[in-house]
Image (cartoon, grey):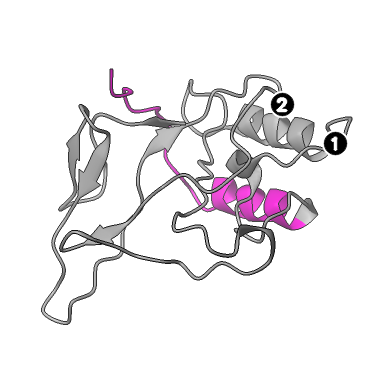
């Protein structure tokens, strides 16, 4: 997974040295954001992470997403960027890469394609990616952190 050096959402700051994206909460203590980045999965089935890898902290305290099932006890979030190929923004080519992960032989879990975060890659993940594509998502791939 690669974090973008700049984020498109207002209020986010990126620090590439340790790959940190940060922001401030609102008056209610809420901070909701999307981290821009991509994976390097040009044709589907490329080697990749098979576990949650994004740690989220608040005031220096590591938050626990309270996973159930296979990821129970892991204090990290599944990272699944819609931009699977890392080039030309989010396009149908990225859908093809997800299909490659979905039908990979032997069956392999690729966290990068688990868009609903349930610990498996299924047609539901592909449907979520298709819905995002046709909702008018971004058309450029931001530059990666070095």
Instruction: Residue at 45%, 54% (x, y): give it.
Output: 76
Q: Is residue 101 above or below residue 24?
A: above
Instruction: Residue at 83%, 32% (x, y): give it.
Output: 104
The residue under label 1 is: 103
Instruction: Residue at 55%, 51% (x, y): give it.
Output: 132
Q: CA distance from mark 1 to mark 2?
A: 9 Å
Q: Residue furthest front?
A: 73
Q: Is residue 9 above or below residue 57?
A: above
Q: Which residues are magenta?
A: 124-146
The answer to the question of whether label 1 and label 2 lie on touching residues, with beta carbons closer than 8 A, is yes
Q: Residues within 10 Å of mark 2 (few under 14, many from 20)?
A: many
The quarter of the image holding the C terminus is top left
Q: Is residue 72 left or right of residue 81?
A: right
Callout 1: SS: loop
Q: Residues within 10 Å of mark 1 (few under 14, many from 20)?
A: some
Pinpoint residue 118: horizontal percent, then vertical percent: 66, 61
The residue under label 2 is: 44
Judge whether residue 82 is colored magenta.
no
Q: Quadrant of residue 107?
A: top right
Q: Quadrant of residue 95?
A: top right
């Amino acid at each position: 997974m690669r974090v973008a050096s700049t984020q498109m959402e207002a209020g986010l700051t990126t620090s590439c040295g340790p790959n940190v994206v940060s922001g401030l909460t609102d008056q209610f203590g809420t901070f909701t954001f999307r981290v821009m980045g991509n994976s390097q999965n040009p044709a589907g089935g490329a080697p990749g992470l098979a576990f949650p890898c994004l740690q989220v902290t608040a005031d220096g305290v590591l938050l626990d997403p309270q996973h159930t099932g296979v990821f129970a006890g892991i204090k990290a979030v599944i990272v699944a960027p819609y931009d699977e190929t890392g080039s030309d923004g989010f396009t149908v080519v990225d859908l093809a890469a997800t299909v490659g992960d979905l039908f990979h032989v032997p069956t392999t879990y690729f966290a990068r394609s688990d868009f609903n975060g349930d610990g498996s890659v299924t047609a539901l993940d592909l449907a979520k990616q298709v819905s995002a594509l046709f909702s008018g998502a971004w058309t450029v791939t931001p530059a990666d952190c070095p």
